[in-house]
Image: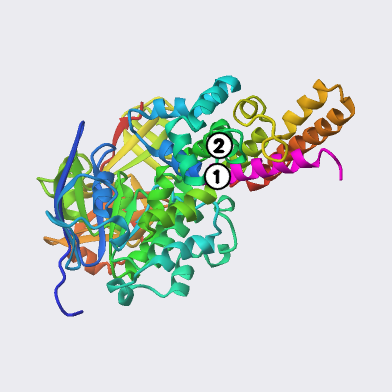
Amino acid sequence: MFPGIEPLILTARLAALTTVILLLIGTPIAWWLARTKNKFKPVIEAVVALPIVLPPTVLGFYLLVLLSPQSGFGGWWFELTGQTLTFSFSGLVIASVIYSFPFVVQPIQSAFETVGRDMMETAYTLGAKPLDAFFTVAVPLAKRGFLTGAVLGFAHTLGEFGVVLMVGGNIPGETRVVSIAIYDHVEALEYGQAHVLSAILLTVAFSTILFMYVVNARLKVKA
Amino acid sequence: MSEAIKNSSCDIRLKRADFYVEANFVIPEKGVLGIFGHSGSGKTSLLRCLAGLEKDVAGRIEVNGEIWLDSVNNLPIQQRNIGYVFQEGRLFPHLTVLKNLDYGASRSKACDGSEKSMDRGHLLDLLNIGHLLARYPFQLSGGEKQRVAIARALLKKPQVLLLDEPLASLDEKRKLEILPYLEKLHEELNIPMLYVSHNLDEMLRLCDHMLVMKQGKLVFSGSMRDVLVSPDSPLARVDSAVAVLEGTVSKQEKIFDISTVHTTNGNRFQVPGLMAIGKRVRLIVFASDVSVTKEKASDTSILNIIKGRVSAVLDKKRGRVLLQVDCNQDVLLSLISVKSFQNLQLSPGAEVYIQLKAVGTKSSE
């Protein structure tokens, strides 16, 4: 078997799982942010956006502290599952969710903002209950935001390096993602393998983004 | 139960930091109740309160004997059986016309409204939208969108239809296109329509009763004619039985001290006084200064005789009739006696010559 396949599969699993989780928890948060008049909204928005500007090592360091069995959360997880969150795939998923959070929430939030109160009100006057109106009006009208969020979340997780290194280390099959594998190969002067993995990541990243732009143009809802 | 008298009334108060809306009125069993007022007078808020779109409304709303709002109950929007037509139509852009229509229809509980409501096919014919079903809203003209929005609201089989300035977003030409549809609905619908507008012409054509809002308060309510001519009506002084036309001065006759004004619709009026050629003026014609003949009088002292068609008979009361006469889209009002009205056998559609005893002018600028 091609030696680089293991990190590739691991990375794909991590990115896919992270994207799904982010769509599930990011959507209600994006909806809340798009609609709220709460005075603390800017604070929440700043927290959501923080991973964009924070150095990955800083984020990774705090996550390492939070996830370690000595901390409250890490310890609770250890008692529950018998496994540590640090240096494990589960820990990597949690770290990726936080790391890629703004990339999913922000596009969905701005898409929801353009849907506006008017359309929801209209649905209500036609007899739709709030959840019904959300799924039949808000989500379809915000579908480009969902696509952008999902693609950016996926692509951003693919390229994760610093956070993974801090939280997950370099355990083959468990936490050794492509970006780490490339780093290892370069360190070991194995430029051939580094080339192969880099080219694959480049191709995947480019195709994903290209896919987003092509589909986004087609999804446009004409007003 | 259909024989029982079912009351519909609305008595609400809405308090805002910078705004207060208060109104108490009875919703007629059918026909069009106009809600007139300038922008910011609270007329749209009133409609929104009735629909349940505003929070913090106090008071009592009862429709067909069902309590929508009182000190204990506050029925959510979804459970108030209303049809709401917004100013901009607000069709769902991601759905075809057909799916837009079905959106409300499929969620309708169609309780009491059902026996009063109109057959779907008939409604689509009446609004002339049957050929649009497969299209998306962006493929429709403004007037078509509004007609679809009206059909969508009605297919929900509502107990009351609320129209919030449905023509305001349309240009004059489209307005004239859609008004006849609203008039047809007026004739055929068995539910009350509440029609919010700041345009008195629309109101003249459509409404049976009118509420006048001013600074959040209901200042007058009554029949269309009462609103126009009652001494205590706020509109009686400003707009009562007065037609206003826009025109441009096209000719001066110095010997007679008379100017000729052309309206945009091609009618010519001779008015006293000399005015600069090319000047835009507003012509003000009181209904009481307008008489009607069936044949064009030839030997008369009256200078302004214009051919037109009776477009509406607005009200017959106290021996007088207010006629609306359409002269190539310039709409004039004429107040004549019921006796003349009967002698001339006038009815909507009748061709007439109107004679203007006096025309006032006002500079447009």
Seen at 40% across and 56% down, the residue is: B179
- Tell me the chain of label 2: A
Q: Residues within 10 Å of mark 1 (few under 14, many from 20)?
A: some
Of all residues, the one furthest to the right in this rendering is: A192
Asked if marks 2 and 1 touch (Cβ < 8 Å), the reply is yes
- Percent of width and height locating residue B129: 51, 64
Seen at 37% across and 67% down, the residue is: B108
Q: Name the amino acid, label 2.
A: Val
- Percent of width and height locating residue B275: 36, 26
Callout 1: SS: helix
Residue A5 relative to residue B181: left or right: right
Q: Nearer the viewer, residue A38 or B129?
A: A38
The N terminus of chain B lies in quadrant: bottom left
- Tell me the chain of label 1: A
* Residue at numbered disc 2: A97
* Residue at numbered disc 1: A21
Callout 2: SS: helix
Seen at 80% across and 42% down, the residue is: A5
Specify the quadrant of the image occupied by residue A87: top right
Q: Name the amino acid, label 1.
A: Ile
- Magenta segment: does it hold A131? no
Q: Nearer the viewer, residue B190 or B86?
A: B86
Give the magenta-colored segment's residue range.
Answer: A1-24
The C terminus of chain B lies in quadrant: top left
- Percent of width and height locating residue A223: 55, 46
Q: Nearer the viewer, residue B315 or A19?
A: A19
- Magenta segment: does it hold A9? yes
- Percent of width and height locating residue B56: 20, 44
Gap in Å between the C-alphas at discs 2 and 1? 7 Å
